[in-house]
Image (cartoon, helix red, strand yellow):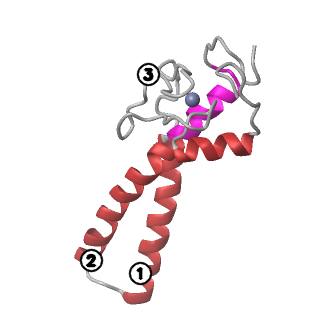
Amino acid sequence: MTRDTYPERTDKEIIKLGFRGRCPRCGIGRIYAKFLKVNDECWNCGLVLSEHDAGDGAVVPALLIIGTIIVGLALWVEFKHEPAVWVHVVLWGPLSLGLTAWILPRLKGIGIALQHKHRSTEEATKPGGS
Ligand SMILES: [Zn+2]
């Protein structure tokens, strides 16, 4: 595979790559330099990642998913075990932060990868070669 020819990927493949934080074009390079800091470009294929516009697009689905999990678990624990209030504070605060730290990069990666697939950002080379 040369630098200018990369396969056209299906949405399922793109979502998997974004979830894993991999470059949506070559699948080898990483999207992130740090936690949510996107690399300027892919070290492997040179895809410019700095022009993505994922913004806060991952936040709303993250809130919905995490909120559903936390509220569901809190209700279950409350009705099943009837613990003291401090138990809820100790359980759900750290779990909320942990889930957020885990899911946000994955959802943002999916957003960036889907932008690449559907060409909503400017890019000189198209998947499959130009
Ligand atoms: Zn790449």
Amino acid type at image mark 3: Asp
Answer few, some or many: residues within 10 Å of disc 3's Cα (few below 14, many 20 plus, some between 14 and 19).
Answer: some
Q: Earlier in the sequence, mark 2 or mark 1?
A: 1
Tell whether label 1 touches label 2 (CB within 8 Å). yes
Q: Residue sitting at 68 percent across and 18 percent down? A: 4
CA gap between label 3 and label 1 equals 44 Å
The one of 116 and 53 positioned closer to us in this rendering: 116
Q: Is mark 3 within 8 Å of ligand 1?
A: no
Please tell me which of labels 3 and 1 falls first in the chain.
Answer: 3
Q: Specify whether residue 124 is painted magenta.
A: no
Q: Secondary structure at mark 1?
A: helix
Q: Which of the four quarters of the rendered structure image does ligand 1 lie in?
A: top right
Q: Which residue is mark 3?
A: 40
For label 2, the SS is helix
- Please provide percent x and percent y for residue 86: 22, 75
* Residue interval drawn in magenta: 108-120
Residue under label 1, please give it.
77
**Vertical order, 127 against 99 (above or below):** above
From this view, report whether residue 16 is shown above or below residue 52. below
Which residue position holds label 2?
A: 87
Please tell me the numbered disc located at residue 120. Answer: none
Which quadrant is the C terminus positioned in? top right
Residue 45 at what x, y percent from top left?
57, 25
Measure how far apart labels 3 and 2 are at the Cα level: 43 Å
Q: Which element type, helix, strand or loop, lies under badge 3?
A: loop
Give amino acid for label 2: Val
Kind of residue at badge 1? Val
